[in-house]
Image (spheres, grey):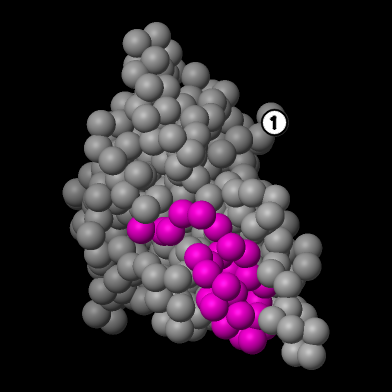
């Protein structure tokens, strides 16, 4: 697991209480002191408020998520005192049974002996760790996984997913390796005053040459790559090429990208890729651990946005904010599926780069 991850990312996933008695907002402290109604917020403002409340509540905070329909921030807490602080801040409190620390330990333990085709995420709508097994996990492997999940009692649950979890190795414009394999460009960035772009780590190996057409002139070379563990790569432009900080919307227009930020669970997002173009969906979990056939990748964003081979490396974004790079998943854009994304903030930090 990656020890540098902060609670700030983890707090952006949250969910419902575990009993009817505890599943809704608490009653006002007294009839004479009515609690304020939750404030309507944008996803960005909800994320900022969640970070502020993390500092105020500390270990009493058990996650947060964005209710897109009500445009409110829902914050999980472990006590009535914490719930009142949440109300005063303009968010909706929900009391849950398990802390983030408890669920994080369960997730880590389940990841320690994971098999390919599985993923683990803290789902605070359920206040449990959800372990997902794809169609390749069966027989003794599935029986062992069921046993390990059952041993965690009410803190974990096993779900099945159709298809197969795999990097989408074949956002943005198409980029081609010298061997003819295709991925998608994620975000154009600048490091030390020089132009680069980001893509998926599973697409790239050191010194891979990239072009904008199949078997075309090399316009960039991979100078850093990380997969598994992370799933990001840094490619330096080696030819004069326009490199604006924009995402191709495949309708003749493009979306400027001005900043990078982690999304919040419940937020609506979009993805651009060279196979299926622009698709949208919702963030369902953060800090997700996925075990691909090639190895485990930790700290991913999970969404309902569909993707297919060739979309790998493409950008996940909302408005002018970049969120991630397409990593992998299961399903397709005909039947739907689950997809995972490398957080953009981490890739920029790891490479000392900025959007440019």
Residue at the disc numbered 1: 334
Position of the C terminus, as image quadrant, is bottom left
Residue 109 inside the magenta-drawn segment? no
Residue at the image position 54 percent from the left and 26 percent from the top: 160
Q: Position of residue 345 (x, y in %)?
A: 39, 68
- In the picture shown, does residue 59 fall above or below 201? below
Q: Is residue 177 left or right of residue 99?
A: left
* Res 89 visible: yes
**Nearest the camera: 214 or 52?**
52
**Nearest the camera: 143 or 305?**
143
Residue 65 in which image quadrant: bottom right
Q: Position of residue 67 (x, y in %)?
A: 70, 63
- In the picture shown, does residue 71 fall above or below 20? below
Q: Residue furthest bottom?
A: 32
The magenta stretch spans which residues? 75-101
Q: Position of residue 12 (x, y in %)?
A: 50, 64
Count of numbered badges drawn on the protein: 1
Residue at the image position 48 percent from the left and 39 percent from the top: 154
Indicate the secondary structure of the residue bearing disc 1: loop
């Amino acid at each position: 697991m990656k020890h540098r991850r902060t609670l700030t990312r983890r707090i952006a996933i949250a969910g419902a209480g575990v009993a009817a008695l505890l599943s809704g907002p608490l009653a006002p402290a007294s009839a004479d002191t009515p609690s304020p109604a939750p404030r309507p917020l944008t996803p960005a403002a909800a994320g900022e408020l969640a970070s502020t409340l993390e500092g105020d509540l500390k270990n009493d905070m058990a996650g947060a998520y964005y209710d897109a329909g009500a445009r409110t921030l829902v914050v999980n807490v472990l006590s009535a005192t914490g719930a009142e602080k949440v109300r005063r801040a303009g968010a909706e409190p929900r009391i849950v049974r398990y802390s983030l620390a408890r669920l994080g330990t369960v997730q880590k333990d389940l990841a320690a002996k994971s098999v390919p085709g599985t993923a683990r995420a803290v789902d605070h709508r359920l206040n449990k760790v959800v372990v997902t097994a794809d169609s390749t996990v069966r027989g003794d492997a599935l029986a062992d996984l069921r046993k390990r999940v059952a041993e965690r009692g009410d803190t974990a649950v096993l779900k099945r997913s159709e298809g197969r979890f795999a990097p989408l190795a074949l956002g943005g414009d198409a980029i081609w390796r010298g061997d003819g394999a295709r991925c998608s460009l994620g975000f154009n960035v600048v490091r030390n005053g020089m132009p680069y772009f980001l893509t998926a780590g599973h697409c790239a190996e050191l010194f891979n040459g990239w072009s904008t057409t199949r078997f075309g002139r090399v316009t960039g070379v991979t100078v850093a790559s990380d997969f598994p563990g992370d799933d990001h790569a840094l490619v330096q432009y080696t030819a004069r090429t326009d490199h604006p900080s924009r995402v191709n919307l495949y309708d003749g227009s493009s979306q400027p990208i001005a900043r990078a930020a982690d999304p919040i669970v419940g937020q609506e997002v979009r993805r651009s890729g060279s196979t299926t173009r622009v698709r949208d969906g919702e963030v369902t979990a953060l800090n997700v651990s996925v075990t691909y056939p090639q190895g485990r990748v930790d700290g991913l964003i999970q969404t309902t946005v569909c993707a297919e081979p060739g979309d790998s490396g493409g950008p996940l974004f909302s408005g002018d904010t970049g969120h991630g790079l397409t990593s992998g998943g299961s399903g397709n854009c005909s039947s739907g599926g689950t997809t995972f994304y490398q957080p953009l903030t981490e890739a920029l930090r790891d490479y000392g780069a900025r959007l440019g």
